């Protein structure tokens, strides 16, 4: 089976990747790590460079976890891409996403991407709090 991972080049993306790798090592599942975004300037901090995607691949390999790392910049937000993948791929059994710390007001909204995923995913969602340091 496959664990789908929503990845961004950030502390929350690293937290999601680390948790998914740990889970895959225990279950033997493969990972499908996805970096997705609209691809516009406003969204650039969520879009990984090729070097960052390669570092994610290297991290998985160093931990002995099989899988793929892909990027989708097709005009859809990350939630739309990840939700579509959970529906299109019958082998996806779980979705892992990272959450970042929010201000008191921000907590009311959780984050539109995270909220959309958690409320609409057809598979269980593991949400992981962001890491203190960004390593990959």
Image (cartoon, rainbow, N blue to C red):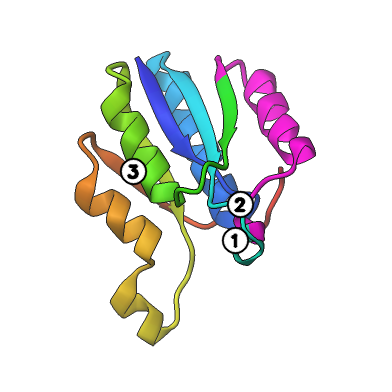
Q: Is residue 134 left or right of residue 31?
A: right
Local crowd size for mark 3, using a 10 Å CA cut-off: few (<14), some (14–19), many (≥20): some
User: Residue 44 at x, y = what percent?
Assistant: 66, 58
- Nearest-to-viewer mark from 3 and 1: 1
Give the mark nearer the N terminus: 3 vs 1.
1
| For the residues bearing labels 2 and 3, Cβ distance under 8 angstroms | no
Q: Is residue 48 magenta?
A: yes
Q: Which residues are magenta?
A: 44-67
**Residue 43, label in figure:** 1
Residue found farthest to the front? 75
Residue assigned mark 2: 39
Quadrant where the C terminus is found in the figure:
top right
Residue assigned mark 3: 126
Q: State the residue in front, 51 or 41.
A: 41
The chief SS type of the magenta part is helix
Q: Is residue 5 magenta?
A: no
């Amino acid at each position: 089976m496959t664990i789908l991972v929503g990845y961004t080049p950030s502390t929350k993306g690293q937290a999601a990747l680390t948790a998914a790798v740990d889970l895959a090592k225990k279950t033997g599942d493969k990972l499908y790590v996805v970096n997705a975004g609209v691809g516009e300037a406003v969204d650039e901090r969520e879009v990984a460079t090729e070097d960052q995607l390669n570092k994610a691949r290297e991290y998985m390999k160093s931990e002995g976890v099989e899988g793929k790392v892909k990027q989708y910049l097709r005009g859809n937000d990350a939630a739309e891409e990840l939700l579509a993948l959970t529906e299109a791929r019958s082998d996806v059994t779980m979705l892992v996403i990272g959450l970042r710390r929010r201000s008191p007001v921000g907590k009311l909204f959780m984050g539109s991407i995270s909220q959309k995923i958690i409320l609409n995913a057809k598979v269980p969602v593991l949400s992981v709090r962001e890491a203190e340091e960004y390593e990959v």
